[in-house]
Image: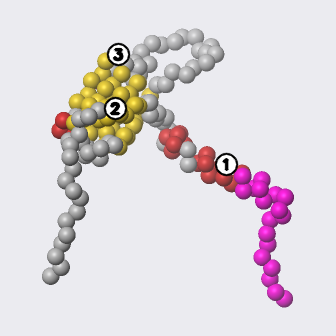
Amino acid sequence: MSMIRWQRPHSMTGVIDEMDRAFRDLAAAPWAAALHAGGFEWGPAVDVYETEDQIVVKSSLPGVQKEDLEVNATEDGLTIHGESKQEEEVKDDNYYRKELRRGTFHRQIPWPASVDPDTVSAKLEDGVLVVRATKIEKAAGGKQITVE
């Protein structure tokens, strides 16, 4: 007796494939790992642009104090990490809508050009973080090695 490979009926194939895709997308969502870890981390919106001699990154961080903010720069990119805290206590929990984000945030931004990390400066004013980095000329990559 020969074996025949089982195949789904054609009418159900599309539905089952769509459900499989939806579950894969849901599991791969950026927020899914944070939910499983027991916390929720959000990434603030950023604008990145370059001038003739600088890369400028602007990030909207309303309500964040500079003491609750950590900015790190490397040759590869910029990391913004911090916490938005809720200062007021609300006794009445009858919210109709609650959209203000509270908690920790983290954002990694790659530099669009080569920068010197030692020249990076950051300023937080009126809820807007402005980071400036001086662009540098990167040496031509690579070197030919003589095989002995």
For marks 3 and 1 on the same chain, the one whose residue lies earlier in the sequence: 1
Q: Where is mark 2, residue-wise?
A: 57
Q: Say left or right for 24 vs 138.
A: right
Residue in the picture at 29% in, 47% down:
76
Q: Nearer the viewer, mark 2 or mark 3?
A: 2
Front residue of this view, candidates 100 and 74: 74
Q: Residues within 10 Å of mark 3 (few under 14, many from 20)?
A: few
Q: CA distance from mark 3 to mark 1?
A: 41 Å
Q: Is residue 20 above or below residue 148?
A: above
Q: Was residue 15 drawn as part of the magenta stretch in this picture?
A: yes
Contact, mark 3 vs mark 1 (Cβ under 8 Å): no
Q: CA distance from mark 1 to mark 2?
A: 34 Å
Element under label 2? strand
Residue assigned mark 3? 126
Q: Which residue appears at 30% of the width and 44% of the height? A: 113
> The residue under label 1 is which amino acid type?
Ala
> Can the viewer see residue 70?
no
N-term mark: 1 or 2? 1
48 lies above or below 93: below
Q: Which mark is residue 108?
A: none
Amino acid at pointer 3: Asp
Q: Quadrant for residue 141, please give it.
A: bottom left
Foreground pick, 48 / 45: 48
Q: Where is residue 23 drawn, in percent x and y?
A: 65, 50
Report the side of 21 relative to 8 (left or right): left
Tell me how far mark 2 sits from mark 3, CA to CA: 15 Å
At a point 82% along the width and 86% down the height, the residue shown is: 2
Residue under numbered circle 1: 22
Span of residues in magenta: 1-18
Quadrant of image for the N terminus:
bottom right
Where residue 38 sits: x, y (%)? 50, 38
Residue type at mark 2 is Val
